[in-house]
């Protein structure tokens, strides 16, 4: 236990994905907010260390038994207890959405005033009962869909795991918005989404049939139309959710291959793995796993107002996007004169 956690920050980051001081603060938070308690034979820090080690390296129960000198039942029970404590702490761990301000000078986000962040889905490999596999297989692997929303500074705002991989993007999004305490989008605000989603109030999608992906613009090609320029800037900003997903799977090995836990526990694992990076990002200004990622300064205001409750196309929203695209291109061309 001492060698795993307390010998050095380098070892702690390698084994648990955070520095020693951050680990201590996490244990305190899970105790006071998540309700995690010491037991007669195990302190909170050992419980949390076991859970983080399993998530970070996808260590099997039999290996953890040997490494921590505990029974398999003890390892399994405390792993689930820590997952539950993390999920009970989500109100504190999830980022509150804050819009892009009129005064923003960020090159990626200044074009999207009142935008709250980006939304997308990703697939996580799971093991499911044989009878359910057909619903979870969009490709060759067995997957669940995870809908996630992140802020401009790469913190998760909302996470919904558990839908079968074959579910359509729009169906998952509608479910997220219909749930009690589900995804909420205040009027006048929106999230960036990819072309797989409907372009509608609260969700700004790129133009279809136009260049979009960042690689399309790295060959020296310059946008010539408002739609092309809009797509280029949209892709640059929305890429934040792709980076979140990439870092998430890089950080937690348990998300990179199917585990032997029940579907219920696997969904809790996914949720916990999304909550922990928010805590790490707040408590560790320098994260070695983000060395190649940009960081954004959070100087924004939390939106208020009634939420959007439907996902429907409208001429008004399409016209607003067209007007935004035209203004974006005009501003960009004027700055080059």
Image (spheres, rainbow, N blue to C red):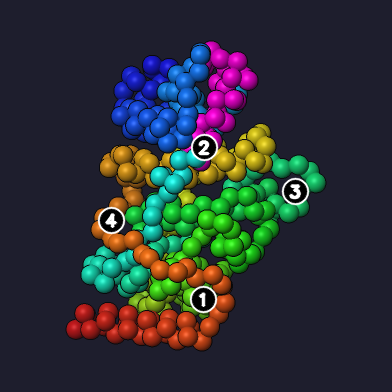
Q: Which residue is mark 2?
A: 253
Q: Nearer the viewer, residue 104 or 94?
A: 94
Please say if the residues under marks 2 and 1 sit with CB atoms less than 8 Å apart.
no
Residue at x 51%, y 13% (from the top left corner):
41
In terms of secondary structure, where does tag 3 sit? Answer: helix
In terms of secondary structure, where does tag 4 sit? Answer: loop
The residue mark sitting in front, 4 or 3, is 4
Please say if the residues under marks 1 and 4 sit with CB atoms less than 8 Å apart.
no
Lower position in the chain sequence, tag 3 or tag 2? 3
Q: Left or right: where does residue 109 sit relative to residue 57?
A: left
Q: Position of residue 7 (x, y in %)?
A: 33, 19
Q: Which residues fall within the magenta stretch?
A: 62-87
Report the quarter where the N terminus lies.
top left
In terms of secondary structure, where does tag 1 sit? Answer: loop
Magenta stretch encompasses residue 65: yes
Q: Nearer the viewer, residue 263 or 187?
A: 187
Q: Which residue is mark 4?
A: 298
Other-residue count near label 4 (Cα within 10 Å), few / some / many at <14 / 14–19 / ≥20 = few
């Amino acid at each position: 236990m001492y060698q795993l956690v307390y010998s050095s920050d380098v070892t702690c980051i390698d084994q648990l994905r955070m520095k020693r001081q951050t680990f201590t603060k996490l244990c305190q938070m899970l105790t006071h907010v998540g309700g995690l308690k010491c037991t007669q034979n195990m302190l909170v820090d050992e419980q949390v260390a076991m859970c983080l080690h399993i998530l970070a390296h996808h260590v099997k129960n039999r290996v953890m038994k040997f490494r921590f000198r505990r029974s398999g039942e003890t390892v399994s029970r405390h792993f689930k207890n820590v997952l539950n404590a993390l999920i009970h702490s989500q109100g504190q761990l999830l980022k509150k959405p804050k819009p892009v301000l009129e005064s923003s000078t960020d090159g990626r986000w200044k074009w999207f005033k009142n935008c709250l962040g980006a939304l997308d889905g990703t697939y996580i490999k799971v093991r499911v009962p044989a009878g359910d596999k057909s619903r979870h297989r969009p490709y060759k692997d067995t997957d669940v869909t995870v809908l996630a929303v992140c802020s401009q500074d790469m913190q998760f705002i909302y996470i919904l795991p558990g839908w079968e991989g074959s579910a359509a993007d729009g169906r998952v999004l509608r479910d997220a918005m219909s749930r009690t305490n589900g995804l909420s989008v205040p009027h006048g605000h929106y999230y960036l989404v990819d072309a797989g989603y409907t372009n509608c109030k609260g969700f700004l999608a790129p133009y279809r049939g136009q260049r979009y992906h960042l690689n399309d613009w790295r060959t020296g090609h310059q946008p010539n139309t408002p739609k092309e320029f809009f797509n280029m800037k949209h892709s640059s900003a929305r890429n934040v959710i792709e980076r979140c997903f990439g870092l998430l799977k890089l950080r937690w090995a348990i998300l990179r291959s199917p585990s032997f836990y029940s579907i219920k526990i696997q969904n809790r694992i996914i949720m916990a793995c999304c909550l922990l990076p928010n805590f790490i990002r707040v408590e560790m200004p320098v994260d070695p796993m983000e060395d190649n990622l940009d960081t954004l300064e959070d100087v924004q205001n939390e939106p208020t107002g009634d939420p959007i409750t439907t996902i429907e196309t409208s001429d008004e929203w399409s016209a607003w996007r067209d007007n935004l695209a035209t203004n974006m291109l005009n501003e960009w061309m004027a700055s080059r004169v």
